[in-house]
Image (tube, helix red, strand yellow):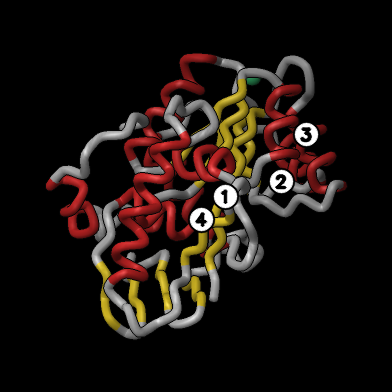
């Protein structure tokens, strides 16, 4: 995954087509992985990033719970046994806070009683270690397609639409061609329509919590997006607005 700004390559431009098959649904999806076994955690992160998801990682229960409570995610992958704060307790407390993010619990135990315990604490699904990576991706997709998931399949703002399943973006019924990162950025803005989002929020959500990119990169990508969404529709009111000193807002 490229975290540093660079010129858009031909590959980026073609990425719509390349990834418009099996995995297009995952692009820009934000995942939190809480797992204390570093090797497993790092492998999951690397694998999901190859699936074009944005992944934050926590190696213990306390920092994992903090991230889960303060950031917004499409799905949380939570190890059952964690130092600091137990996985089931994290699950229970997040649900008590009203957090509805789908939670997939990883467990070394396959005991039925353990599963029941997890489900009654608000977990959505279970995966027993060791597991095949494809199985993890399939479970994530199943969870985020459920009706209570943060994602809706089609996002709409004014005459702009974005499909999270087909990857189609249109304005005024005219198809637009976006790079992978532009797509992720636009889907984030559309999920927060009418709300001012800061550059820091955008970096955290589109590039990932640990990304070492500069706020200037956000401006650069916002410029690309503006050109495609607003500049080519001079008769339409612009949808991307800069809120000086704060950030950006998408809407009329
Ligand atoms: Ca563990």
Q: Which badge, 2 or 4, comes first in the chain's sequence?
A: 2
Residue with the mark numbered 1: 247
**Which residue position holds label 3?**
90
Please tell me which of labels 2 and 3 falls first in the chain. Answer: 3
Residue 165 rendering spot, x and y as whole percentages: 38, 66
Helix, strand, or loop for circle 1? strand
Quick one: label 4 or label 3, which is nearer the N terminus? 3
Question: Within the displayed image, which quadrant is ligand 1 positioned in?
Answer: top right
- Judge by depth and name the residue closer to the eye, 207 or 40: 207
138 lies above or below 109: below
- Is label 4 in contact with label 1 (beta carbons under 8 Å)? no
Give the Cα distance between marks 4 and 1: 13 Å
**Mark 1 or mark 2, which is nearer the start of the sequence?**
2
Report the number of discs: 4
Q: Nearer the viewer, mark 2 or mark 1?
A: 1
Residue at position x 67%, y 51% in the image: 101
Extreme-front residue of the structure: 244
Q: Earlier in the sequence, mark 4 or mark 1?
A: 4
Q: CA distance from mark 2 to mark 1?
A: 35 Å
Of labels 1 and 3, earlier in sequence is 3
Q: Residues within 10 Å of mark 2 (few under 14, many from 20)?
A: many
- Name the residue at 60% across, 52% down: 197
- Residue at image mark 4: 188
Q: Which residue is mark 2?
A: 123
Residue sitting nearer the eye, 46 or 238 = 238
Q: Could you give the CA–CA distance between mark 2 and mark 4, rounded to whole angstroms?
A: 25 Å
């Amino acid at each position: 995954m490229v975290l540093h700004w660079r010129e858009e390559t031909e590959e980026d431009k073609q990425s719509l087509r390349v990834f418009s098959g099996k995995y297009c649904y995952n692009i820009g999806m934000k995942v939190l992985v809480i797992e204390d076994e570093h090797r497993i955690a790092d492998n999951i992160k690397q694998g999901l990033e190859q699936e074009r998801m944005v992944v934050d990682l926590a190696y213990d229960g306390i920092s994992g719970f903090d991230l889960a409570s303060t950031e917004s995610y499409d799905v949380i992958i939570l190890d059952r046994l964690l130092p600091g704060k137990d996985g089931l307790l994290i699950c229970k407390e997040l649900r008590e806070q009203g957090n509805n993010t789908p939670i997939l619990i990883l467990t070394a135990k396959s005991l039925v009683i353990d599963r029941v315990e997890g489900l009654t604490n608000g977990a959505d699904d279970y995966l027993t270690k060791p597991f095949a990576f494809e199985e993890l991706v399939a479970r994530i997709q199943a969870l985020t397609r459920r009706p209570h998931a943060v994602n809706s399949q089609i996002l709409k703002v004014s005459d702009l639409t974005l499909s999270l399943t087909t990857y189609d973006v249109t304005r005024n019924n005219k198809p637009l061609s976006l790079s992978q990162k532009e797509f992720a950025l636009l889907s984030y803005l559309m999920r927060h329509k009418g709300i001012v989002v800061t550059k820091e929020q955008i970096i955290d959500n589109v590039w990932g919590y640990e990304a070492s990119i500069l706020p200037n990169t956000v401006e650069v990508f916002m410029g690309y997006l503006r050109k495609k969404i607003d500049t080519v529709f001079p008769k339409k009111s612009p949808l991307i607005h800069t809120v000086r000193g704060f950030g950006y807002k998408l809407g009329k």
